[in-house]
Amino acid sequence: MKLFENIYAYTWGSAFYDSSNSYVISDGETAIIDPGTYKSYTNLFGLLKNDGVGSIDYVLNTHLHKDHCESNQMFMRKGALLGFDERDRTISQFGFSSDLKLGKRFVVGNTEVEIIRTPGHSPGSLTFYIQKYGVAITGDLIFEGGIPGRFDLYGGDRHEFVQSLEKLRELDAEYILPGHKRIMKGRKGIDSMLEGAIEIVGLY
């Protein structure tokens, strides 16, 4: 589904509950963020083709849990370069190595992406923020309704999780593109959901 001129979203809902949503930036070059699992790959590939998305130059991961990264190699074997925070190698069942040294900015064609460290769900969790559209691709930090992601998994950290949610509040994002379930829209509603998620995490 095309969200903006250069941004596409593929959200699965209950169809593939055990696979992450996937997002694409296509602007001269093309990056896919969180390709998901093998189970959803055939559907994802068909939707990319239907949307006219060509070859993938970069695969970026918000984190390296299986449901977000199992299909990395389906694109890597066609020449895509991989980028993630190396801290997540400690929690991954895969032997991925990052081809890209991700700093605070990454440019896909003519689209600039801000890369923000948002650990807590995993030690190397990242948020990809596209200021031009007010879009934050957040992995498993928060879901619709203000439900926070898990911080009790191996490599998770409650304190870091809260700090990461606070970072999201500072972005003034108009859209949150989460790792699962539906996209969240509207600055005021997003801020309320983030505030609620912080309160929920604080109960533990």
Image (tube, rainbow, N blue to C red):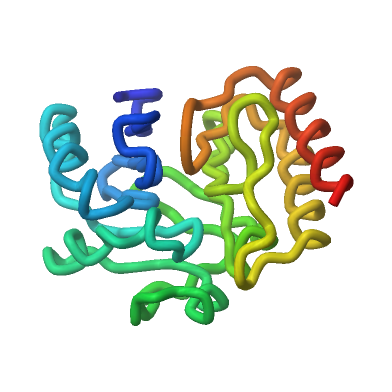
x 38%, y 39%: residue: 17
Residue 39 shown left or right of residue 95 in the figure: left
x 46%, y 67%: residue: 84
x 67%, y 35%: residue: 147
- Image spot of residue 130 (x, y percent): 53, 40
Q: Nearer the viewer, residue 150 or 171?
A: 150
Q: Nearer the viewer, residue 17 or 113?
A: 17
Whether 171 is drawn above or below 62: the answer is: above
Q: Nearer the viewer, residue 194 or 14?
A: 14
Q: If the image is split into quadrants, where does the N terminus sit?
A: top left
Whether 110 is drawn above or below 61: the answer is: above
Residue 82 shown left or right of residue 193 in the figure: left
Residue 99 shown left or right of residue 129 in the figure: left
Q: Say which quarter of the image contains residue 175.
A: top right
The tally of labels here is: 0
- Image spot of residue 4 (x, y percent): 39, 24
- Image spot of residue 176 (x, y percent): 57, 32
Q: Say which quarter of the image contains residue 174.
A: top right
- Image spot of residue 194 (x, y percent): 75, 34
x 34%, y 32%: residue: 12
